[in-house]
Image (cartoon, rainbow, N blue to C red):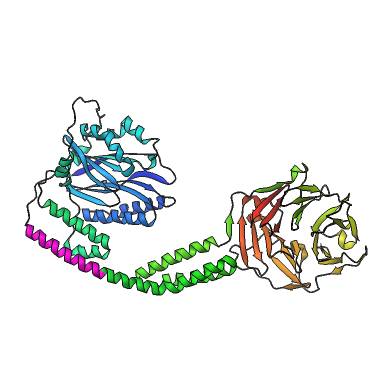
Amino acid sequence: MLKLLQRTLVGQATDNQRSGVLIHPTQDLVVLYAVSSANAGEAFLHYCQEQFDHEAPQSSLELHQLLDRCISTAERMEVELSLVSMGVMEDRVVLAAYNGSVWLKRGSKVGQILSAESTLQLLEGKTQVDDVYALFTQKAMPLSALIQDALAKTTAQTAATLIELPELRSAVHGSADEPLTGLSVAAVKDVEAVSDDRVDSVELHDSSQPAMLTPAEVDQQLSQTISPPATPLGKVTHGVGKGVGGVRRAVKGVSAQFGQLFSQDVYVRQKHRRSALKVGLVLLALLLIAIGALGFWRNHRQEQQKQVASILTPYQTQFAQIKDLSVNDPVTARAQLGLLITEVEAKAQDQAQPKFVQEALQAQLDTIKEFNQSISGQTQLPHLPTFFDLRLVQSNFLASRIDVTAETLFFLDSGQRRILALNIEKKQPTLLPIGEYPDIRALVANDEFLYFLGQGLFRFTLSGTEVASIVENSDDVITDGQSLGLFDKYLYVLNKTRNNIFRYDTEDDKLDSEPTAWIQSGQGVDLNNVQTFAIDGDVWLSTQTGEILKLSGGRTAAFEISGLADPFTTPISIFTKPDLQNLYVLEPEKSRVVVLNKEGQFIKEIKSDELAGATAVVASEKHSKAFALSGSLVYEVGL
């Protein structure tokens, strides 16, 4: 019984390229491979290994089918593949190459017997004990010149040492194609003798010249001795049914057989000559069957295409309309795309549909899902750019509050009771000359004035140089107030102790005016659970449990978030203003900023690790940016 003894040399693998060898559990089949793929290499090799573990080819035809499945899968997974295999089946050898080559050393002669590029080629014939084969991946084929002399001088006992040739290893390691370079040397041994064999060093300095096969001898003595797998007449129509490629391969197989009818088997034994008339009749029958099958296949294919078009056209039309809609209204487009995906998925999973229809539907579904991902609004960033470091202005400046107008960011350091203005366009900072105050807890600004909350309500004119003036004297509401809001001429103070938001008129010329309790009674709002609030005419409250509450005219109003895949569940901060179209929500524990429109529809989500330490967020839609505050650092979030 014959067995293979083999050794393999492969280059150093990279993330996307590698070469190696697969050995069948029976040890009778060796497959040398090189794969190149951006992301599917590992999955493809896993698939091939499973195929080899569960298949045991008993003929050249079965081996051809196994390798053809692997090649088709590689094309489908966009894997560039080089594959060379050798299998021993009793006293016969089957060789296969796809983007690779095979050399044979028999007796005193050596030569290339198989080479293929972009097609799968098989050769079969009777092997002999002590034959030595060299298998090359496509990128390793130039190495044949390096080992040609040594291959001619080696024996089955020393063949494995060819892998150790210094010039061979030097040529492989460090080369541009190293990850795709693979070489296997295999010797055919009798199973009873294998245990007694010992690998000796190959002698490369023998003075005698090896006998080399001329190209004509290779064609006459080697190529003719091994034939492609036989293609029974009964299998022809099946091959044609797979397309023109199937017919072409079938004709190639019969042509090779026809050539062997008039040759002698130098490699194995002489074959009996056959009747030329019989061969001619077989070829004529094959040609007629191929022509008829090809015509039938074309008609059948056209009918399939019509059936697929009738099913896909409505979905394709709807998909095109959604793509146009996404340019101006991505929220509605996402909603419609979700319904379309559900509809196409259900159709694709309908087992009553023919397989070719299911495959066409699945391909269309993949295209729709890919576009859906592109407009999903979800962005993961490894790092956010730092917009400004407040320590450049004052080394110990630590901001606790932030606000923004059309052109300017404002920062409050409540510990030092300082307010810094930063021009967004020029990044020009200014410490505002507001005066000295024992307490500043919150601030809010419009284009004309900056207001802040301390032991009273104060106003600073942004275009002037005078210190801030008092608007309202301190009272119980102001003394216990935590946050400040502004709309039109009114200031709003959030007071958790009194569980209400109080409104002050900034233009009544009274320093001790009575504030208006804005939230009407019976609304069931617990301000102790509120994290932040924002005003745009309505009042928006964010809670420590991830809720957003809307109040309109002092009463709770309906508001529901839609389209957000991961709901808010932890403390959140909210920001908006009358001139902004959207709501901007910071959820530090999930390291994200979420953009919603004011109807609650999801627009965008930006995730980054830097947001885990942020305490507040503001936005400038004019500059298409949000700004996240984290102590002394201000991060820029592109919108």
List x then y, in percent, for residue 210. Answer: 19, 31
Of residue 177 and residue 127, the one placed in the foreground of this image is 177
List x then y, in percent, for residue 363. Answer: 42, 65
Task: Judge left or right: residue 222 versus residue 383.
Answer: left
Is residue 82 visible to the viewer in this orientation of the structure?
A: yes
Place residue 579 in its image quadrant. bottom right
Place residue 221 in its image quadrant. top left
At 71% from the left and 61% from the top, the residue drawn is 574
At 39% from the left and 37% from the top, the residue drawn is 175
Place residue 292 in its image quadrant. bottom left
Q: Is residue 295 one of those drawn in magenta?
A: yes
Give the quadrant of the C terminus.
bottom right
Task: Judge left or right: residue 502 versus residue 134.
Answer: right
Is residue 188 visible to the viewer in this orientation of the structure?
A: no
- The dominant secondary structure in magenta is helix
Q: Is residue 71 above or below residue 545?
A: above
Of residue 427 and residue 263, the one placed in the foreground of this image is 427
Task: Judge left or right: residue 235 versus residue 609.
Answer: left
Q: Is residue 590 above or below residue 331?
A: above
List x then y, in percent, for residue 450. Answer: 82, 57
Give the quadrant of the N terminus.
top left
Give the residues drawn in magenta, as a range: 269-296
Q: Is residue 427 one of those drawn in magenta?
A: no
Q: Is residue 134 above or below residue 402?
A: above
List x then y, in percent, for residue 582. Answer: 68, 64
State the count of labels.
0
